[in-house]
Image (cartoon, rainbow, N blue to C red):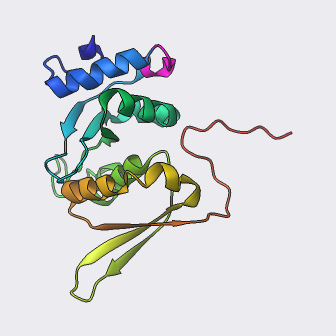
Amino acid sequence: MAANKFWKKKELSSLEQQVGSALTQIEGTITEVKNLRLSSVVDFTSKINAKKQVYLVFIPYPCLSIYNKISQKLLPELEKRVKATILVVAKRTIESKWVKKHRSQTRPNSRTLTTVYDGLLEDLISPSVILGRRTRVRVDGTKFYRIFLDESDQKDLESRLESIKDIYKVLTTRDLEFEFRRDDTFYQKKGAKKVGKN
């Protein structure tokens, strides 16, 4: 049954079987999980020297819109069953602008390094939203990125921020710093239902 939750994958590791079977159990309470598929599950605990188990779940890019709709319900349920911090990221491809089959061929913007790295960060902090970002340079010349998040999401995100920083550093070699601030402008969270005007 766990293999049904994975996209084009038949042989699963013990960790992938554990996460896959947890998802099939959740299907009873959250029906939208039936359409969600996973690509792979990676244990990042030893790579980032975390005290608690941290798993990074890769999903196919077409499933990202499904995940965004149910992420607020799904993540707490999945973490309860697996007993670990779980971060979900869509699988994206970076293409070199020099690799061409034809002279006139152009690279899609979605395959550039900057877009993929930005998308990766948005997935990691989901369902929260990035309010602003700044690039800062330290006295020794090293760069870091300051990310501003919504104050209302602080309770949900604070326990996961260290894991997000460390995993993002391993995947992209970029340093992050997070700050929470109040957002006075109106926006909708990913996956939230549109409110009709009265």
Q: Of 51 and 176, which appears nearest the observer?
A: 51
Q: Is 192 left or right of 180, judged from the image as shown?
A: right
Residue 129 at least partly seen: no
Is 126 magenta? The answer is no
Whether 119 is drawn above or below 132: the answer is: above
Q: Quadrant of residue 196?
A: top right
Q: Residue at x 34, y 50 (%)?
A: 120
Q: Of 76 and 149, which appears nearest the observer?
A: 76
Is 30 magenta? The answer is yes
Whether 126 is drawn above or below 130: the answer is: above
Give the extent of the magenta segment.
28-34
Q: Residue at x 25, y 53 (%)?
A: 167
Q: Residue at x 36, y 33 (%)?
A: 79
Residue closest to the far bottom: 139
Q: Of 71 and 51, which appears nearest the observer?
A: 51
Q: Quadrant of residue 190?
A: top right
Residue 37 point in image, percent of width and height: 34, 24
